Structure formats: C-alpha cells, structure tokens
Amino acid sequence: MSKKVAIVLLVGLSIVMLLAIAELPIYGCANTPVQNYVAERYISGALSDTGALNMVASIVIDYRAYDTLIETTVLFTSIIAVFLVLKKGKD
Amino acid sequence: MTDFVLKRMVALLLPFVQMFGLYVIFHGHLSPGGSFSGGIVTGLGLIAFSLVFGIERSEEKITERMTTLIESFGALWYGAMGLVGILRGTSFLMNKGSGISLGVPGKLYSGGLILLITLGVGLKVASTMVTLFTSLMEEED
C-alpha cells in the first residue's frame, strides 16, 4: 500500500519537475535574468580590476574571495572529521 | 609493492608531475587551472610515491606533522592576506582597492594578492590530500 502511494507521489513530483524544466529559458539565450550587469562587469572589468589574465581566477579569488575562504575551511573541516573518526588518542 | 617497472616509472615521472602541479599553482592567474587543480596534482604526486614506495619512505620525505602544519597554515595564510586590506585602511580581502601594485598583466607577478592567495590555497589542498591519504592508510594496519 505504502509502496503504491510512494510511486504515485514520485510520478506526480517528477511531472511537476519536468513541467518546470520545460519552462526554463534556452541555454545561452541572451534575454534571461542570468545575463545581467554582473556578468557584463566581470567580462569588461576583470582585467583592469584585478590584473589577472585568467578571468576564473580573478572571480574566484578576487570578486568572490569570501566564498573561496570558506571553501578552504571546508577542506579543513574534512581533515578534522577524519581525525576525529580515525585517530586514536593517547591513553 | 616491489615491482621494479612500477618503481622506476614513478621515479621517472614524479619530478615532472610535481613540476607541473607547481606550475599550475603559480600560473593560476595567467592560464587555466589554479590553486585547487594544481594542489590536487601536487598532492597526488606525493600519494603515488607513498603508494609505490611504501608509507614509511614517504614519511621520511615529508612527515605527517609537517603536512598537518602546512594544512593549517594555508587557511591562516588566506586570512592573513585578507588582513592586508584592513591594514591598508579598506575592507577585508580587498585587492586593487587597498593600493597593492597589480603589475603588468601576463607577467608572473601580476594580479596583486591573487598569486599569494593561490600559493597558500594550493599548498593547503596538496597537504589535505596527503593527510587524508596517510591517515586512511595507517588505519589499515
């Protein structure tokens, strides 16, 4: 019984998701909310703002530096988790 | 593992792998790649060494305490580079606005703080890989 309910619910959910996907704009289309002034600013101003030729590096480490700072602490957290689980403390 | 061919191949390839990893880290602001990918390449070189030559030999090259220290140093280095902006009177992690010379675009020294931050994060990613690997390997015996 619960299996049938689950199947019906999943089919309904996937129909809703597929309808949402059908509404998405075409990939790379110019007139979408994603293509706003932020992307234009990155493309036109990245070299003069940061002096780095690699625009990805200038976004990751200059414009979005806070994001990368927390991203490095994610690695740190993974080390802490492994040490907590695996390392034996001194008795 | 005591396979002769495997040992000689790793000994032959490792310098180039390490050189390439450091190249990707140092040229993160000039060419595709950067701190994360370059750090992974550098760390995987060390992991290949300890896989083929044994974990004791790699412990002689770089101790686990050293990798843990580098690992912690990377995050602190990033924060210290962010404090440069505050010391110069602007906001945290400010690069151009804090009056640092950006250099000539295309040269190795360009991009202000980006090169220094990339170096720290690259070392951190490499030592994270090595530390995870060694602590998982040690648990088996």
Image (cartoon, coloured by chain):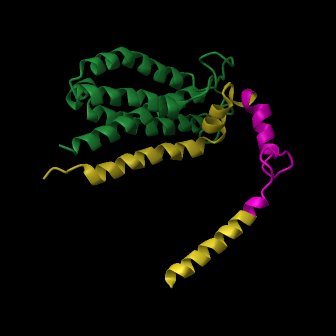
Chain colours: A yellow, B green
Q: Residue at x 22, y 45 (%)?
A: B139
Give, as a single range, the part of the protein colored magenta: A20-47
Question: Could you tell whether B3 is left or right of A74 in the image?
Answer: left
Q: Residue at x 51, y 25 (%)?
A: B25
> From this viewpoint, is residue B72 visible?
yes
Rendered location of residue B85, percent (x, y) = 60, 36
Q: State whether residue B110 is above or below residue A11.
A: above
Q: State whether residue A38 is above or below residue A8.
A: above
Counting labels gives: 0
Rendered location of residue A30, percent (x, y) = 85, 45
Residue that protrudes farthest toward the left in the picture: A91
Rendered location of residue B102, percent (x, y) = 66, 23
Query: As rendered, which of B59 and B2 lies closer to the eye?
Result: B2
Query: As rendered, which of A80 and B138 lies closer to the eye?
Result: B138
Residue that protrudes farthest toward the right in the picture: A31
Rendered location of residue A36, percent (x, y) = 81, 47
Query: As rendered, which of B126 and A70 lies closer to the eye?
Result: B126
Does the magenta segment cover residue A33?
yes
In the picture, residue A68 is in which quadrant?
A: top right
Q: Residue at x 68, y 17 (%)?
A: B104
